[in-house]
Amino acid sequence: MYDDVRLVVENFESSADIGALLAAALPPPPQCPRHLLPHLAQAYWLRYRAQSGFDGLIDREFWASVVGGDADPVVAAVTAAEQYRELVEARADFLECQDPESLVDFVNAYTALLDAVDDERMKAALTVDQCALLLMLDEYDGTNDYAEKVLNALDWALARTPHADPQRARRLVDRARARVNAGRRRDQVLADYRAAAQLALRERPVWRDIVVELAQYESDLYASGAAPIYLAGAFVTCRDLADALERDFGNTVTLSALAQLEHEVSSRIGPDVARFLRTCHRDPHALQAQRDKVEALRRQDIGPGVLMERRDQAWLLAIGLPLDHEDRLDVLLDLYDRHTDLWELGGDTAAIGLACDTVFEAMLTTSPGDARRAELLEALAHAAKTLSVQTGSPDDATVAVAAARAVLEMPARDEGQRAVRLSNLASTLVRQFELGANPAAGQEAVTVAEEAVALTPPGDEDLPLRWSRLSTAARHVAESGDHALFARAVEAGAQAVAAIPEDDVRRIGMLYNYAAALQAQAVATDVTDAEPFREAERAYRAALALLAPDHPDNPRIESTIADLLYHRYHQCGDLDALDDSLDLAEKAVRETPRDHHWWPLRAFALARSARALATFGGPRADELRQQAIAHYRAVGTHPAATAQHRMLCERGQAAILAEADPATTLNALERVIAAIPATISRALPRSQRLRAVRQLDGLADRVVDAGARSGELDRALELLEQCRAVLFGDAWGIRRGWAKLLKIRPELAEELSRVEKDLADADFYSDLTFHIEVEYAGRTSTRDWDPRPQAVERIRRLAARREGLIQGARAVRGLENLLIPPDLEMLRERLIGHTAVIVSAAGTALVVPGDYLRPVETVPLRQMTSSTARAQLRKLRAALADVKAPGCSFDRREQAQLDVHAVLEWLWDTTAGPVLDRVADSRLWWCPVGVMAGLPLHAAGRHRDRAGLTVFDRIVASYTPSLTALADTVHTPPRQHPRPTALVVGVGEREGLPTLPSARDEAEAVAALLPGSTVLMDSAASADAIKDGLHDHAIAHFACHGRAVSSAGHPDLGGLMLDNGMFVPSFVRDLRTTQAQLAFLSACDTASPDPALLDEPLNLASAFHLAGFRGVIGTLWHTADSTETAVAVYEALTAHGTRPADTAQAATALTETSRRMRDAYTAVPTRWAAHVHVGD
């Protein structure tokens, strides 16, 4: 039974009920009476325009068949596909079942069809449909996992929807709803709604549902506490809808809401405003009067409230204009300027977001062919770049770059205009580079800025600006590590200053950027000569002198000079500079409103200088300390402060409080640690995460010291687990959670595993560029490939997906605390029978007894200080370098061995001896923090005295990366491997490296002690063969060269050296074994800590432990052939080859072997002190 098509059309035109229109049962054209065919055609046409996806395109085909229009062959090709038939079946199944399982099948059917379709127009329509299902899937699951994916997909679909497409308005509404769902800025949502309403108001009859939805959203914003301007917007939207209804239906239709809104605007904002908004669209004189008011305010001098009044009156004019008014673009661009002034000159933190959204709305409501498109794109590039300063969002910076590129691709009238556009692109690229959104953007910014300079003739008034932009670009790239570019930055800055006339107001900016380049170079290169600082100060002060006394830029430059002077004190020891720094910082803070977006940065400079001055004592010391603490606290709670600055402020407070109240210090340190996840987000590429981890240097030592002095040892231990081994801890938590999840929810575990692998792959490419050469038929072609931008964006997307999976895993019983730091009570319960010792150079060791009933206790290390520990570490490294150096003399090598002995003896006297005098256990685990992680605690002792005063002679010692790692390992019962044999790898020859003559002998000897083992020698030891073998055996043994993994380079530049290639940490990370028992890495530097990140275990031994090996034996430094050590360990584990290896005794076997080696080669400690055991 079909509905009466005449009534369907008439009812819709009078009611605008989209639901009823789409639910109507329309007859197929052949079954419709001839006299009703026009109504049927109209019904299908209305349904086409009422839908945003592929179903609307099908309705259009029905319309075409009725009116005799051309069919769309692409739509026919889609509906003829096998995947479309399966989609129809999945839809029917979902409509019948209405459950999550059938919905997932429905979504997957769309994915399959999208994969089979090539036409972008069809893909856009299908994507819109699938987005609606993904949001429905979130509703079923009670999550918001697909919010970002849906928004990105709708962005893609709208970018491929022409401005005149009849479905564009509906898709804009879809995206507005998706923005709300994803928590986007409200004016971004409004921009989409207004663009949709603009199209809806043009329809005859008006698509009132779209306009009503806009009015409802504006009204809801006001009701939820937003500014009254949104109430005015709702009123104007209803006004325009009433006019459209009058146009379409005469005076028979009224809007009751209009009078109510007018009354509320009149009472809330003012009757004059209500009257203006009600009539201005029909009264040119009222509009002109409002324009004149805005212009008069624009000419008025900046004073209290002027910037805000300018903006509000411009906003009122923009709100009052109909969406299709011919002057709307001019009014929106003027509003954009007023928002921007309020941000740049008034410090209003919300204004720049409003500016960006205003120009975005102008873009959406203006035809792509508009003559002012380039002006709009330039405004969008500037606004989005500036917004990214406030938000720190890579997305905003990426929008800016895309807009600047789009302008550059438009025809330029001459080289001068192209130079302007190149310079603007360079500016946006610099910001994108700063935020880490595109590692390639920095160098591109320099190249683009240089091209802009080259296109600008001498004497051109914009040449100084181009030089200054080049200076800024080169400075930012140099600050990221390419210090060679500092010279270019300083030179370009100097050129800008030389080229700008003395009376040009832009000279202020040229001087500032030149000084910034000098300062950045001096700070980054740690110069101790004060002259570069003085030259920078002269330039800053010259810029300051050109400003009027009440200019809003005065505090910016004053605060920058304060920062410069602090660094001059810090690097050059100039105490007078520190006094001046504090004075200027105080002045800058006094002149900056508390709600200004730069206030936190200026207050931080004040706090830092006050804290430094307080350390010198004197009558003002207490006052300065209180001043520093007050400003650190204020910055830490300021809404505009970055997570990085909050952390620095908490550390600053902790350093001050450490001198007084240790309990309060621990509170401050806890706040520092709480900020760590925000600064080391998994959404960042590895290089940025490592930079953030370096900021934690010394934090663990402070926690130990504060805990020991306050007596809050349990709390200190809990904090320690959160502030060291941060990257390792994240990976460890995921791996351990994965093992549990695999048993309970294998599909979720596999998805998490895939995302982790994809993240690791993206990390791999986030720090690499490639130069590719191909030779064919005697010709060579080359190209450069930079995968970093795509890799960084992929990391961000995958990190969001990872977070969703983690949240899903936490809903599984037993995994509620996945990646949440465990409390100490749980750790202590799991560590029963295993005593651990945290050792800190702050002068304290914390003993965590294996007896759960005994409290954590401190062992004072009275002779230990951080400076002496660092001196001993330098001494050890120098000795190891001499031992390894081929050209080192015999005398120096002998002295180097004596120096190693001296370090081991110092370690015994200051650390191991006092600890073992207190700890009676014969087995313990060292967990050193900070600089102590670089010293061989396991081998400490007076070995030359032969008096038993050594760790070797007293206990069996292992290391653990963290208490959590040890607790998890010992709490998990060892699983019996079906093959208690070994994968044995021996690589004795590698091009470019010394031959290891005993590698083959070692491999064969180990394999002989473990019958049934797989032996891979030299060329047979490929990475793939090793990965396969690791799954098949309980033990892995490597005899080859090793290269230390370093945070200074790509992680996969370190690892085990194979015949043709390397076995790198990422290969091990993907292993995820649950049955591996022991890895013996008989290669150099496999357990050595990273010199720059001593608290972050990045070495290969940690990678094997992370992959699932309960215990790992590695080396701290380069060793001679260690066959003797390896064979002796396996002989002990296997009773000389008469039983399967007892890997649980690996630490004992290594200790006994090291003791025998020590006795045999006492004079050569580098030979017997290098091997360590990690884990259980």
Image (cartoon, grey):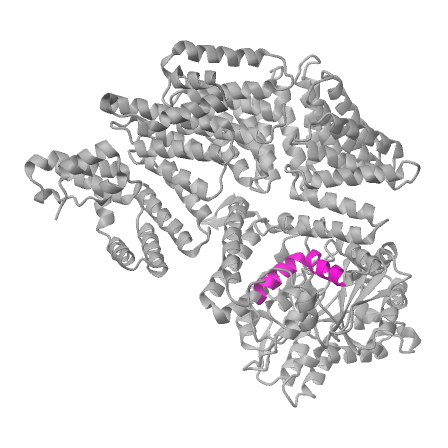
Q: Nearer the viewer, residue 600 or 1100?
A: 600
| Residue 730 on the magenta segment | yes
What are the residue bounds of the magenta stretch? 714-736
Give me the residue at 54% from left, 69% from top: 739
Q: Quadrant of residue 140?
A: bottom left
Q: Is residue 775 left or right of residue 609?
A: left
Residue at the limit of the structure toward the bottom, as seen here: 1138
Residue 113 in sight from this viewpoint:
yes
Q: Quadrant of residue 496?
A: top right
Q: Is residue 437 left or right of residue 611?
A: left
Residue 571 in sight from this viewpoint:
no
Rendered location of residue 10, percent (x, y): 18, 33
Rendered location of residue 1149, percent (x, y): 74, 80
| Residue 85 on the magenta segment | no
Whether 301 is drawn above or below 1129: the answer is above
Q: Looking at the rendering, in which quadrant would you find the C terminus? A: bottom right
Q: Is residue 388 left or right of residue 838?
A: left
Q: Nearer the viewer, residue 753 or 1114?
A: 753
Give me the residue at 23% from left, 21% from top: 250
Rendered location of residue 765, percent (x, y): 55, 51
Give me the residue at 59% from left, 42% from top: 436
Whether 404 is drawn above or below 24: the answer is above
